[in-house]
Amino acid sequence: SEADFQSYYAEMPWLALPFGSPQKEMLGMTYQVRGIPSLIILDGSSGRLISSDGRADVGGAYFNMQSCLEKWGVAAPPPPPVEEKPPAAPKKALPKALPIDEEIAKAALSRVDSEEYEVQETFFRTGLKVLDNTLQNPEEAKFRQLKCSNAALKSKLLDVAGSAGKELMRLAGFKDSADGELLVLDGPPDGKCTSVRERMQAAATAIWEKHAREERDARIKDEIEKDKSRAPTYKGGGDENGRMQIGRKRGGGG
């Protein structure tokens, strides 16, 4: 049913034709789809059919994609060059999460949710970086103070969505300095900082998934419009429906 389609579609990352689309019926007949799930393997550059039963191919190979590629005669892409980097320092375990004022946190994140995606993405990227620096370097004072007059920090985090960034930093344990110039964490971060980070990470993931679905839907709509413009137009003889009048007409006439 259409309700089932919409339910599954909302959770899937790939593109899909709209429910009831004539293109779906055309593809089903072209590739003789008899049921779902069905996996058809095509050559992406030419459209050539490689396998009409990719589902069996993948299952028979126990999901070993290298074996599937070999069976399909497709060369696996070369692995990316290995860039040697110094070993990263192990991340510190975060302090155990402590209760925060959930109403303030929800209200701040709700205001951010009303912003444009570009603003949201920058807000969460900046906020998570600030909290990660603080949590991973608890003894370094430079990571425990935020300059409120810093133009980049103001526009990307602190003043966004009615000072949502400031409210969240305060929930994490930062306090306003006497002159109002700084947000300062008096000592090493505690579990409140962990809790705010968790809320921000969950919200960031949700807005990214929403944006990804919107981009996917826009691509589908664009492809449908392109299909309409590429649809063949009947130019042969016959009536307005393309039917040929063969044989003698019925009715009068001598």
Image (cartoon, rainbow, N blue to C red):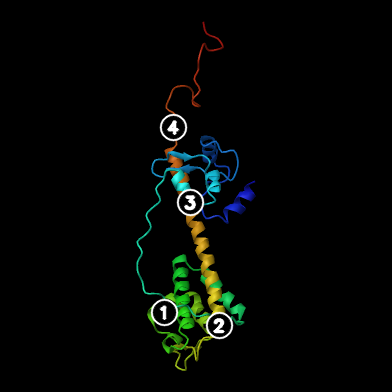
Residue under numbered circle 4: 233
Residue at 43% in and 43% down: 226
Q: Can you give x and y, in whole percent of width and height, for residue 64 in the image?
A: 50, 52
Q: Residues within 10 Å of mark 4 (few under 14, many from 20)?
A: few
- Which amino acid type is marked by label 1? Leu
- Which amino acid type is marked by label 2? Pro
Circle 3 sits in a helix, a strand or a loop, which is it?
helix
User: Mark number for residue 65?
Assistant: 3
Q: Residues within 10 Å of mark 2 (few under 14, many from 20)?
A: some
Residue at 45% in and 90% down: 180
- Dot 3 or dot 1: first in sequence order is 3
Q: Can you give x and y, in whole percent of width and height, for residue 183 in the image?
A: 47, 87
State the separation of the CA atoms marked 4 and 3: 41 Å
User: Mark number for residue 153?
Assistant: 1
- Dot 3 or dot 2: first in sequence order is 3
- Which amino acid type is marked by label 3? Met
Residues 231 and 146: in front is 146
State the separation of the CA atoms marked 3 and 1: 45 Å
Residues 206 and 139: in front is 139
Circle 1 sits in a helix, a strand or a loop, which is it?
helix
- Dot 4 or dot 3: first in sequence order is 3
- Dot 1 or dot 4: first in sequence order is 1
Which one is closest to the eye, mark 2 or mark 1? 2
Residue at 60% in and 53% down: 8
Residue under numbered circle 2: 95
User: Is any atom of residue 159 visible in this view?
Assistant: no
Q: Residue furthest top?
A: 254
Q: Can you give x and y, in whole percent of width and height, for residue 175 in the image?
A: 51, 89
Q: Can you give x and y, in whole percent of width and height, for residue 3 in the image?
A: 64, 50
Q: Residues within 10 Å of mark 1 (few under 14, many from 20)?
A: some
